[in-house]
Amino acid sequence: MKTTISHIKADIGSLPGHTVVYEPVVNAVDKYIKENGESLISDYHISHIGDDIQITMVHKMGADNPEIHELAWNAFKAGTEVAKEAGLYGAGQDLLKDAFSGNIKGMGPGVAELEITPRKAEPFIVYMMDKTEPGAFNYPIYKMFGDPFNTPGLVIDPNMHMGFKFEVWDIYNGKKVIMSLPEDTYDLLALIGSKGKYVIKRVFTKETHSKLPDENVAVITTDKLSFIAGEYVGKDDPAGIVRIQSGLPASGEALEPFANSYLVSGWMRGSFNGPIMPVGLNNSMMTRFDGPPRVAAMGFVLKDGKLHGPVDMFNDVAFDFARTEALQMANYIRKMGVFEPHRLPDEDMEYTALPRILEKLAPRFKNIEDKGAKSEMKLER
Ligand code: F6R
Ligand code: MG
Ligand code: MG
């Protein structure tokens, strides 16, 4: 029988402003799951990064199960009560709807669910990012499952030499495509380099995988990016689950993409490119310029429905260089103020005063009379 790992996360209020979760709120979420989850889930773990509370649950009810989703929704509601009493900033902010209606997707929280056939030993890593968007996972997930310079297992382990299948979502048009690596590598990269438009949703093994054929081995939250009322609704701090070892990326291959910092969209006001910084769980509060965007990783093993762990994977000197590099990158790019490419292009910004500024300036805009200038501009376009 299949086992499901459901990871559901939400920002329901923080201290003092989008910096860090408030312990009594986290405790209220934990208490609700403990008191109400017993008949539904076999185990769970509550964690957090920045202003987001994260619930990892294990159960037999399958993905998209209304009772599991409702359990998480009600736990976030219980946390929101405490957040409101404390007057926290952004109390309940990700709970976009008033009443639960069968599936938590499209209601605000982020959801990543893996339905798996558990192996004898089932190790996996849960990654949590704050102050960035789901496309921030494109680069590391590609490296883990597609790049032999990151994952030598793709070359030297016969159990993974056949490659993997990637499910990519076009979030502007509500379409998905399955791409098979290594055959489709260049086509995949052509898409996922546009991290605000195409996002990796899942990775599967191939039918020819010798140990675990046709299984879902990685999943990323993409929820606010799905279409609610036909609209693109903006960024959402993402989380992901990656199964590891034995014909899948080794633990170290699943961490290696974070050994160097890379640029992601989000950071201050969801409107800037900035370096992602791998951190231990005790360093997961958002400070400088509301960041820098961070990623934490929790290593678990699952046995008979029970979770063992987590191991705080980036809480190690091996990632000191990446942290220093991220801070150097932050110093460098922050000097650019509101100029691109530090600031995002206007269509990708979470906040923009541009329409109002353009409206105000409209009467002051005049046609360019210089004919030469006009044709030059046309040529450039
Ligand atoms: C970005 C984020 C923060 C807020 C910023 C301003 O995702 O959560 O950077 O955007 O703190 O918040 P408001 O506009 O609520 O004052
Ligand atoms: Mg927030
Ligand atoms: Mg957040």
Image: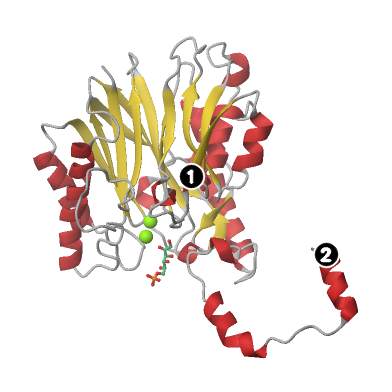
**For mark 2, what is the residue?**
380
193 relative to 291 in the view: left or right: right
Residue 199 is marked as none
Q: Which mark is residue 174?
A: 1
In screen coordinates, is 348 left or right of 336? left
**Percent position (x, y) of residue 114?**
35, 30
Q: Is residue 323 above or below residue 348?
A: above
Q: Nearer the viewer, residue 221 or 372?
A: 372
Q: Is residue 57 visible?
A: yes
Q: Gap in Å between the C-alphas at discs 2 and 1?
A: 33 Å
Compare residues 52 and 255 and report the one nearer the observer: 52
Q: Position of residue 228 (x, y in %)?
A: 38, 53
Residue at screen point 44% across, 56% down: 231
Discs 2, 1 touching: Cβ within 8 Å: no
- Please, is residue 360 above or below residue 224 in the view? below
Q: Is residue 289 visible?
A: no
Q: Amino acid at mark 2?
A: Glu
> Quick check: which quadrant has ligand 2?
bottom left
> How many C-alpha atoms fall within 10 Å of the one at disc 1: few (<14), some, or many (≥20)?
few
User: Given the image, on which type of amino acid does mark 1 rest?
Assistant: Gly
